[in-house]
Image (tube, rainbow, N blue to C red):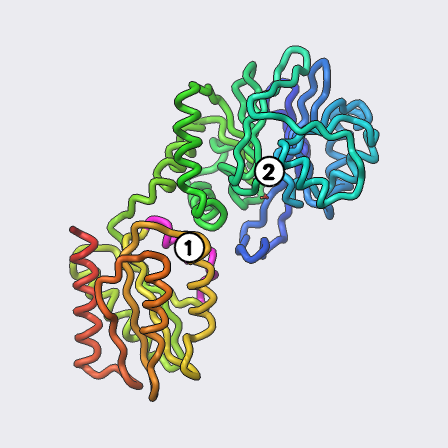
């Protein structure tokens, strides 16, 4: 990726990772980018780095703007290695004694990742660093999504360098929101659902704080995907909505199936929900990645889960999905279970236990059907769907 001047003397020197398809368990079918920013002022600051594998390209990008040795300060907004992996190469190149600014937790975490004794400056929330005409302000955003996260804000340009927040896994030559259509919102939503959902209460507090202090934002530069310059308010408002976890009139029916019986049940349940005027999306787990499913779960009012019973247990893919969803702590959901079985039939009970642990509102004991659903069985599923649809509309 050629460096792009995103504002006067401020450059994105990051890289595109076109071919990554699995980002620690998250499906990235559009690849991703690791954005990093160079501010050329009286002093020169580099904000974040890129994944280790791209360090050559990264140094080359910086070199197209300035001699890397001229960098005065390195800012690390986040320790995770997609943003810190090139630090050893960068520090070696620019001088190991150059000041490295990070949060106090960043200092601890970077020290656990890298043995080098760099010239760390662990900053307090609100601390400033002058570059000459510009001032960097460091804003702690602990647990969004690691303990070390912080934002860096440039008040003169009203630019927020937001680390992972407001990001999207998307690789492209387009670098700004105005160069892409609404498609980017799907990637932003998926990012929120899979990386940030469990921190929603902290995000609501952060957004309140941003309003309270009247932080003026003309541009948001996340470390992944596109930069929000046309309408940064759009992504801020979307975060406010997603963090509030106010559900839409929509249900997802997530299932796996062995011989299509649980699948037939899923379709009948979805039909019952639709008959009540509510959107229903049946999703076969082995046909959809768990991170895609979570994107649908984010704004769903109900998550209905189906599994056959196999060897007295849940189908393994259903266990995988439930474990993943539990960790992301979705709130305000109606839940119900269903599944076919041969002779023991534990799946519905096991799903209900998991949904209860997630504090879902279990509105029905669920439907279990031996072997293949007959008409009575299908009717029971249809009725369950109608009951769910009615509950969503309340
Ligand atoms: Fe993109 Fe938390 O790293």
User: Relative to 298, does residue 10 appear above or below in the rendering?
Assistant: above
User: Relative to 366, does residue 309 appear above or below in the rendering?
Assistant: below
Left/right placement of residue 34 relative to residue 316 reads right
Quarter containing ligand 1? top right
Q: Nearer the viewer, residue 231 or 215?
A: 215
First to last magenta residue range: 287-299
Write down the residue under mark 1: 294
Q: Please identify the residue farthest to the top as the structure is shown.
A: 133
- Please give the name of the residue rendered at 53% of the width and 55% of the height, measured from the top-left corner: 26
Residue 181 position in % (x across, y down) = 43, 38
User: Relative to 144, does residue 277 appear above or below in the rendering?
Assistant: below
Mark drawn on residue 308: none
Write down the residue under mark 2: 148
Classify residue 244 by image quadrant.
Answer: top left
Classify residue 267 by image quadrant.
Answer: bottom left
Left/right placement of residue 82 relative to residue 30 reads right
Q: Nearer the viewer, residue 2 or 82?
A: 82
Disc 1 from disc 2: Cα separation? 25 Å
**Mark 2, other Cα within 10 Å: few <14 / some 14–19 / many ≥20:** many
């Amino acid at each position: 990726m050629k460096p792009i001047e995103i504002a006067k003397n401020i450059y994105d020197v990051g890289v595109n990772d076109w071919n990554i398809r699995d980002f620690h368990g998250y499906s990235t079918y559009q690849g991703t980018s690791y954005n990093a920013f160079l501010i050329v002022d009286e002093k020169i600051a580099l904000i974040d780095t890129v994944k280790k594998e791209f360090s050559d390209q990264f140094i080359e990008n910086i070199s197209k703007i300035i001699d890397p040795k001229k960098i005065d300060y390195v800012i690390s907004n986040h320790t995770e290695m997609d943003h810190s992996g090139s630090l050893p190469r960068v520090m070696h190149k620019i001088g190991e004694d150059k000041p490295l600014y990070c949060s106090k937790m960043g200092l601890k975490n970077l020290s656990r990742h890298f043995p080098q004794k760099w010239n760390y400056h662990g900053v307090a929330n609100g601390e400033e660093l002058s570059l000459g005409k510009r001032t960097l302000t460091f804003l702690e955003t602990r647990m969004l999504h690691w303990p070390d996260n912080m934002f860096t804000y440039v008040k003169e340009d009203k630019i927020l360098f937001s680390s992972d927040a407001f990001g999207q896994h998307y690789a492209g030559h387009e670098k700004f929101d105005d160069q892409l259509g609404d498609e980017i919102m799907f990637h932003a939503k998926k990012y929120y659902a899979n990386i940030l959902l469990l921190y929603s209460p902290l995000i609501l507090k952060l957004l309140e704080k941003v309003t309270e202090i009247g932080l003026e934002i003309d541009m948001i530069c996340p470390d992944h995907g596109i930069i929000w310059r046309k309408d940064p308010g759009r992504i801020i408002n979307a975060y406010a909505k997603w963090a509030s976890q106010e559900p839409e009139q929509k249900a997802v029916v997530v299932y796996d199936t062995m011989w299509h019986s649980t699948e037939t049940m899923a379709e009948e349940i979805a039909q019952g929900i639709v008959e009540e005027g509510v959107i229903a999306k049946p999703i076969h787990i082995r046909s959809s990645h768990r991170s895609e499913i979570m994107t649908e779960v984010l704004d769903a009012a109900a998550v209905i889960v189906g599994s056959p019973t196999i060897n007295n247990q849940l189908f393994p893919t259903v266990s995988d999905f439930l474990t993943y969803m539990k960790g992301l702590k979705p709130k305000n959901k109606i839940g119900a279970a269903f599944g076919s079985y041969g002779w023991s039939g534990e799946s519905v009970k096991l799903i209900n236990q998991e949904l209860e642990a997630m504090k879902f509102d279990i509105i029905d004991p669920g439907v279990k059907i031996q072997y293949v659903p007959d008409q009575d069985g299908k009717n029971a599923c249809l009725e369950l769907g109608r009951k769910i649809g009615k509950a969503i509309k309340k």
